[in-house]
Image (tube, grey):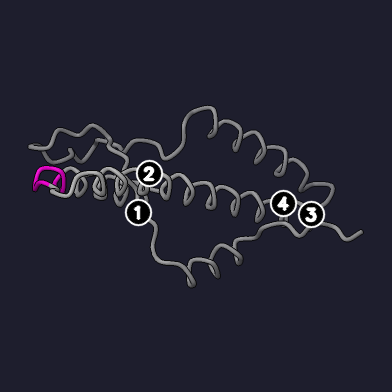
Amino acid sequence: MSEERKLSTSDIAAASDRQSPVAVTIDDGTPQDRPRAADESPAPLFGEGDAQGYRTRWSAIQTGFVDEPRKAVQEADTLVAEVMKRLAEVFAEQRQRMEGAWERNDRVSTEDLRQSMRQYRSFFERLLAI
């Protein structure tokens, strides 16, 4: 029986080269008629429970570095890859919901497109804030 190969950040990068970009439809609640203030932070990309789970795993990996540095680095890469993969999955799911709504309605209004553009802007800003 062979050991299951763990996901790595290289796998994520290679997969993104083969796929079309993934879009997101998350709205951070910024009013449409007001630009974001310089001191306003974008909304988190993950829910608090998910983020805390990732932080807990990271803490365990970091603690393990003392005894097994190579293993800790490999586990860190695996965790980062899992977080990136989950982020892509969440965005893909939201994109499918948005496109599904558009397909049910042959006529997409300018307002619908404006809302989608705001959601893309929110995603873009959050990625740059990382």
The residue that label 1 is drawn on is 23
Q: Is residue 86 magenta?
A: no
How far apart, in angstroms, are the residues tagged by discs 1 and 3? Answer: 34 Å
Q: CB under 8 Å between callouts 1 and 2?
A: yes
Q: CB under 8 Å between callouts 3 and 2?
A: no
The residue that label 3 is drawn on is 71
Q: Which mark is nearer the camera, 1 or 3?
A: 1
Magenta-drawn segment = 109-114
How far apart, in angstroms, are the residues tagged by discs 4 and 3? Answer: 6 Å
The residue that label 4 is drawn on is 75
Magenta span main SS: helix
Taking the image as shown, residue 36 lies to the left or right of residue 60, namely: left
Taking the image as shown, residue 31 lies to the left or right of residue 71, namely: left
Regarding mark 4 in the picture, which secondary structure is present there? helix
Q: Could you tell me which residue is drawn at 13 percent across and 41 percent down?
A: 35
Regarding mark 3 in the picture, which secondary structure is present there? helix
Q: Amino acid at mark 4?
A: Glu
Q: Nearer the N terminus, badge 1 or badge 2?
A: 1
Q: Could you tell me which residue is drawn at 35 percent across and 49 percent down?
A: 95
The residue that label 2 is drawn on is 94
Q: Amino acid at mark 2?
A: Gln
Q: Residues within 10 Å of mark 3 (few under 14, many from 20)?
A: few
Q: For the N terminus, which image quadrant?
A: bottom right
How far apart, in angstroms, are the residues tagged by discs 1 and 2? Answer: 8 Å
Q: Residues within 10 Å of mark 2 (few under 14, many from 20)?
A: some
